[in-house]
Image (tube, rainbow, N blue to C red):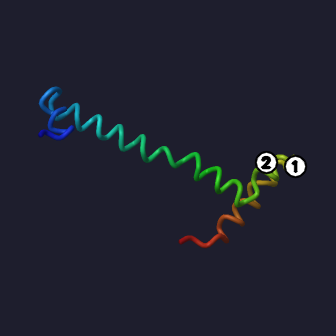
Amino acid sequence: MATWVEHQQQQNGSKDVDEEACMYAMQLSSMVVLPMTLRVAVELGILEQIQAGAQIRTLLPRIWRRGSATPTP
């Protein structure tokens, strides 16, 4: 029994399969961007500061200091 990739190669040629695989990989990798961004925003308290009405020019230096002090795994 042929795999999906082999089946697609027979029908469309290898270039189309490679392009589809690349697009699928990009979709998978971009799916984590929003959840990670929201997690960092919550951890750094960005949403609370925005809600409290902090000015963006005063907010950015505080975020930078907090982010640089956060240990990376």
Could you tell me if the residues under marks 2 and 1 are in contact, i.e. CB atoms within 8 Å?
Answer: no
Residue 48 position in % (x across, y down): 81, 52
Q: Is residue 25 above or below residue 44?
A: above
Quadrant, the N terminus:
top left
Q: Is residue 39 above or below residue 73?
A: above
Q: Residues within 10 Å of mark 2 (few under 14, many from 20)?
A: few
Q: Which mark is residue 31?
A: none
Q: Which mark is residue 56?
A: 2
Tag 2 secondary structure:
helix
Label 2 and label 1: CA atoms lie apart by 12 Å
Indicate left or right for 51 with 13 as reference.
right
Indicate left or right for 26 with 52 as reference.
left
Indicate left or right for 49 with 31 as reference.
right
Please identify the quarter of the rendering in which residue 69 is found.
bottom right
Q: Which residue is at the front of the view, 3 or 14?
A: 3
Residue 5 position in % (x across, y down): 19, 39
Say which amino acid is labelled 2: Ile
Q: Which mark is residue 52?
A: 1
Residue 44 position in % (x across, y down): 72, 60
Tag 1 secondary structure:
loop
Q: Residues within 10 Å of mark 1 (few under 14, many from 20)?
A: few
